[in-house]
Image (cartoon, rainbow, N blue to C red):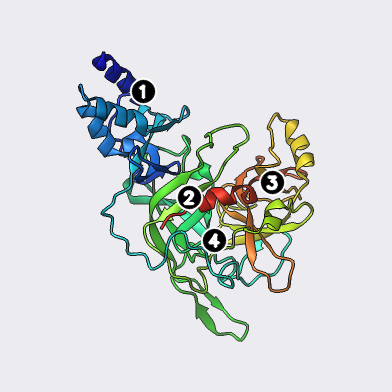
Amino acid sequence: MMLRAIELLLCLFVAVYILAVNTVLVSYGVCNTPFGLPGHCVPLSDCPSLYNLLAQANEDNDIFNHLRNSFCGSDVNATSGPDRTRVCCRDNPNAENKDKESGKMLPAPGTCGITFNMRIFGGVESQVDEFPWSALIKYQRPYNATALNCAGVLINQRYVLSAAHCLRNPSIPTTWKLDSVRLGEWDTRTDPDCYETADGNRNCAPPFVEVKIERIIVHEKYIPHSQSELYDIALIRMAANVNYSETIKPICLPLSSDLRQMTFVNEYADVAGWGRTEVSPYSAVKRTISLLIWDTDACAQKFQTIQIPVNKTLQLCAGGQPMQDTCQGDSGAPLTMRGRLMNSPHFVVGIVSFGMQPCGMASWPGIYTRVTYYVDWILNNLED
């Protein structure tokens, strides 16, 4: 009887092998192990300790029950068996913590959301120190090649917020590996970035900073390739804290209850990124644009004509003016606004999710993950 139970457990865990395609740990949130210890809900292939227990189960009821009680979910959209089964894997208790600050700590008032900003209508080049929370996600490709194919936004010294489809997507080639986050970038062709001032002097910004990715936390309800990309949000935990500077600063989260309840309809929000332009597949220089936020009901009616549902609670729509849009390469970039009071900081209201092709079609807005809905999810998944 016990052998039969172990066979069923083996079927549940689906022909486990160690997966080496992506060295970054994929997490679906924090959890407690059957012993009440802190852990992460991860694919079984990313938890060698439970894999080893599975191999040793034999006739041991305690081990069998421990494995069964470690189960924390399934991902029917995963492309391989070991990725389909999620288990609560204990965090490494001996991991050395060299952080200066807790990863849970949000920026102090007056630290986040501060940038030089001129409201601009239409995509133009940003200033070197404008939108200092912008992040680029770097992938390692075969033959020592690299790619900067998605964006994100810095929210504290340890975490970057981005789109789930940038990190957990069957369309990403299996030969590509998530590598690092680049911060403090402006012109991807130069390092450092230099510019000429009004009086003719030449100034240079600090070199960009790249920090390895320690873990990605993808929203547990995200379904890759779903028609409407619901729950398209993820956190990137970097391997070390970053120091703030003139070109590296965090964005503010919309923490107040007032902000969380706002729809921002008919207001303008800013987005900055390195995505496709009118004349080039990607922009070398960070560009910025201000977009009008739509009434979500009107947006939903628009997309209903092509059988794509839009959820007014989980998503927001912005853009729709001719040649004014986010585009490929901007995925994961933040849609930000400034508070109504003078000198109010900027806060993030959306994350670039998807839009029409080609980009910039008149009367077709882009779809953004509505960050105000996910504030609690973000806070609950930040760790020391």
Tell which tag, 1 or 4, sits nearer the viewer: 1
Tell which tag, 3 or 1, sits nearer the viewer: 1
Crowd tier of the residue under label 3, counting other residues whose Cα lies within 10 Å: few below 14, some 14–19, many 20 or above: many
Q: CA distance from mark 1 to mark 4?
A: 41 Å
Lower position in the chain sequence, tag 3 or tag 4: 4
Between 30 and 147, the one nearer to me in the picture: 30
Q: CA distance from mark 2 to mark 4?
A: 21 Å
Lower position in the chain sequence, tag 2 or tag 1: 1
Residue beneath the point at 60% across and 55% down: 334
Tell which tag, 3 or 4, sits nearer the viewer: 3
Marks 2 and 3: in contact by CB < 8 Å? no
Residue 181 placement (x, y as % from top left): 44, 57
Q: How many marks?
A: 4
Q: Can you identify the residue that label 2 sits on?
A: 381
Lower position in the chain sequence, tag 3 or tag 1: 1
Residue beneath the point at 28% across and 35% down: 50
Residue 281 placement (x, y as % from top left): 56, 50
Between 301 and 107, the one nearer to me in the picture: 107
Q: CA distance from mark 3 to mark 4?
A: 20 Å
Lower position in the chain sequence, tag 3 or tag 2: 3
Q: Can you identify the residue that label 3 sits on?
A: 316
Tell me the kind of residue under disc 1: Leu
Lower position in the chain sequence, tag 2 or tag 4: 4
